Amino acid sequence: MTVKTDIGTTTPDRITVRGKNISTEILGQFDFVDMIWWTTFARMPEQREKNMANLVLVMATDHGLTPSAISARLTYLGAPEALQGAVAAGLLGAGSVFLGSAQNVTEMLVRGAAPLTDEASDAQVRECARALVQEFRDARRPLSGVGHPIHIDGDPRIPTLAAVSRDNGYYGRHWRLMEAIAVVLREDFGRPLPLNAAGGVGAIFAEMGLDPLLARGLGLIGRSAGLVAHILEERESPTGQQIWDLVLAQDPRNALPVRQGARRA
Amino acid sequence: MTVKTDIGTTTPDRITVRGKNISTEILGQFDFVDMIWWTTFARMPEQREKNMANLVLVMATDHGLTPSAISARLTYLGAPEALQGAVAAGLLGAGSVFLGSAQNVTEMLVRGAAPLTDEASDAQVRECARALVQEFRDARRPLSGVGHPIHIDGDPRIPTLAAVSRDNGYYGRHWRLMEAIAVVLREDFGRPLPLNAAGGVGAIFAEMGLDPLLARGLGLIGRSAGLVAHILEERESPTGQQIWDLVLAQDPRNALPVRQGARRA
Amino acid sequence: MTVKTDIGTTTPDRITVRGKNISTEILGQFDFVDMIWWTTFARMPEQREKNMANLVLVMATDHGLTPSAISARLTYLGAPEALQGAVAAGLLGAGSVFLGSAQNVTEMLVRGAAPLTDEASDAQVRECARALVQEFRDARRPLSGVGHPIHIDGDPRIPTLAAVSRDNGYYGRHWRLMEAIAVVLREDFGRPLPLNAAGGVGAIFAEMGLDPLLARGLGLIGRSAGLVAHILEERESPTGQQIWDLVLAQDPRNALPVRQGARRA
Amino acid sequence: MTVKTDIGTTTPDRITVRGKNISTEILGQFDFVDMIWWTTFARMPEQREKNMANLVLVMATDHGLTPSAISARLTYLGAPEALQGAVAAGLLGAGSVFLGSAQNVTEMLVRGAAPLTDEASDAQVRECARALVQEFRDARRPLSGVGHPIHIDGDPRIPTLAAVSRDNGYYGRHWRLMEAIAVVLREDFGRPLPLNAAGGVGAIFAEMGLDPLLARGLGLIGRSAGLVAHILEERESPTGQQIWDLVLAQDPRNALPVRQGARRA
């Protein structure tokens, strides 16, 4: 029976992470991305890996009132003493449809691009894309990485993701396959579904040769930062009660009272 | 070093809960409330305790689109493969403000009613209430159990909770103190804050002599049932995307696209 | 844009659940299983449905130190002020491998038993089981409902689940198919994997014609009760620190201090 | 009724965060700490703030098998399809006792050091520490920031945290007060409870003049990275079942079977 981790060990006077002494070799010397790589891979990131990791973490950090930010704010409304609960509630939506779907894209692209080289012709890439789309349609499985409820004519972040990938030497067959999938969907299947953020992040992870699970993982890390920012704002400028009221007001069977000022003791 | 529980033990061919064999003495013989009591207290509930437990569980089961139901639905939107995550997200708001606050009320009433007997005069009860309100105001701590953002003139469930409590022999000094607190707030402090559900549930738990933590606990059990119902409905009649759209639409800096039909592959 | 639920509506003086007034028609009159049925299906359960619901809820209530109970206790160690977080942490493990897997079994049995009637011969049922096992093996998908890390020679709860199902008129082709799957695995494939609890619960849900998602849902409701009991015991007889110490002690690279009494301020 | 956030807005072709266009002004230009500051404070961090943020994030990243890592691994055992659930389960323990307690320390130090200047004499600082310790003892509230179940003679990270703080101009009255509290506890109260990590992080946040809630928030962000690393390792080198077995084995009333190889279909 063995229960052990190679990530870290602890004694009363020494904590090690992947063999390094945290006090003398890590703290004050590693930045956060170094630490993510060191903890996960037992090696330091190359500079271009750091660039990409920061890109993905920055993107995953929440922007506006996404479902995860709304869930976190509504959770905080009921339990303001437990920030960790509000953050956890926001992260739990990072599944197969939002955020977590970068994992599915990475898996799809690694497998789908296996017959290709980075020097494949456009026609070869497109053929590969067509086969992949057909396979998902035949299996009635949803394709991840394309389509977005708001950015319906193209996610504005995708060109930047592609450019940064190119600058760092990570624009190859996986990115090309992902972009070809959107072309094939539009031209061959009449489905205008441009790449979404998960499509871009999945392409990046596939190019970098990283574990697909880490695509979801970095998404969770970045998103947790956005959720913390939302809760700090929520505490100063609450929206939770208004969101609740707003939702109730959509159904005429509900009725809200006329409130006059604060109603709590 | 001891790590053990008296709740249950397991061997390859025998599972016991509080000493009873689950296969021959429990399954098919206990109902759920029996099992809650047996697991928690190692004894069966009296009939009147069962009546009250069912009352509290039924009340905690969600009704309309509360913050916890909205959080659960928004979580399901992103991760439909993980019902447990949606339910967990909904439960995480059961803190000091909503649902979980029954725990705080129970603690307050047990402590506050200590000088009283069930036969205390109304004046004595009211004096006790006044001291308690004053104490919370002096400490600038919020009073739990009174006030509700919607039921501002009185929670319609309270009279029924009180009546069922009376029928089962659980209407004594704690209930009286709780009701006196609302009277004192209105008459002596000019704060018309009637009892809310947590006030009623807290009074019940205090009367029953049960652990205040269980007040929060039964709330979580009941609420989980309501959340499951909401997710089953959400799967058939989705509201998550509309709630997201609705929230975004409140701020003119956001803009939604004109969508035509489904936009996913 | 419609955001509404048929589960419940609220106004300042009236709360309804599926059209019934909670104060005058539900509280004090429904027990918890009635409320689950009413909230979920807008109808009352038949007596035999209640029997089965109680059976499943009782079984899902935790017994000993399962992974979900251990997670909940370790979470409570860090955040004792937030019971809801400990319960949520315990529920989050109810996925495809444990507890949640009853959902997968229900889906498998409903689909697999479609060609059968309750009067099918044993040979027909077995043939159907063989086809199903073969299908999962060909697709390299894990079969849910069989095998358990502890009850390796047969889960002691299964005979009781089957007997109660029979008594209530819910022992038909789905139960028979589930039991045949274990026979086929052992006799035809040399894999002695008896039914586990998820197998029994899945068979029950398939027999009852209930939504497979509810199989996971009732599991969550029942389990939440077990987790609450574990946390109440944890508060009185803590195990969290010892579990942590025990895990660390498995790896000789870790070292624990000799502690003398309490070490917190 | 206003529901809006100043964190970000979205339209079909433009996403802004605190007024900057994410595609042209943020992605590829900000690193993760820049983004945390920009999202939270609408300003870029100074270099010395980045140094400190990285220090705190690196420290919060998990090391060995802490309670949060064990909870995450046990959750993954049951629901390997939902990484977000395992990470959430691990974060939920970041409450008042572990990790989240840096928030409490920050609040205590900001309040406690209010009468001091950075140039206060050691005697003044010590007097202030004595008053604070006495206050907590009188109120029977636990002091956060001191004592650790493993690092009982001093947390090995504290000297490094102090040194990096000093190098970056963040070693003033709050750090001095925190260190004086440990001295007072030992010398005046006979309680040898050295600073723990939360004590150091709380001192840093108090020095930086940052919101105490962010102390808990950065802890959650950093910890999420550690949890992701643990789950990636767990998938390759599982420990969950062994931890479960190990815990059960502590109680002689439990018995594990003799297992021969894998037992799942």
Image (tube, coloured by chain):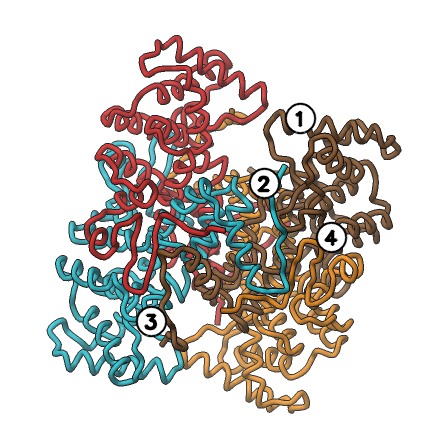
Chain colours: A orange, B red, C cyan, D brown
* Residue D4 can be seen, yes or no: no
Q: Which mark is residue C147?
A: 3
Tell me the CA gap for discs 3 and 4.
46 Å
Left or right placement of residue B107 versus residue A33 in this view = left
Which subunit holds the residue at mark 2?
Answer: C
CA distance for labels 1 and 3: 57 Å
Q: Amino acid at mark 1?
A: Glu
Q: Residue A26 appears at what percent x and percent y?
A: 76, 61
Q: Quadrant of residue D200?
A: top right
Chain for disc number 3? C
| Amino acid, disc 2 | Ala
Query: Which residue was labeled with disc 4?
Result: D156
Indicate the amino acid at tag 3.
Answer: Gly
Mark 1–mark 3 CB contact (< 8 Å): no
Q: Which residue is mark 2?
A: C262
Residue C112 lies, with reference to residue D86, above or below; the image says below
How many numbered marks are there?
4
**Element type at mark 4:** loop
Q: Residue at x 40, y 35 (%)?
A: A255
In whole angstroms, how far apart are the C-alphas of marks 1 and 2?
A: 20 Å
D245 sits to left or right of A207: left
Residue in front for this viewpoint, C178 or B16 = B16
- Chain for disc number 1: D
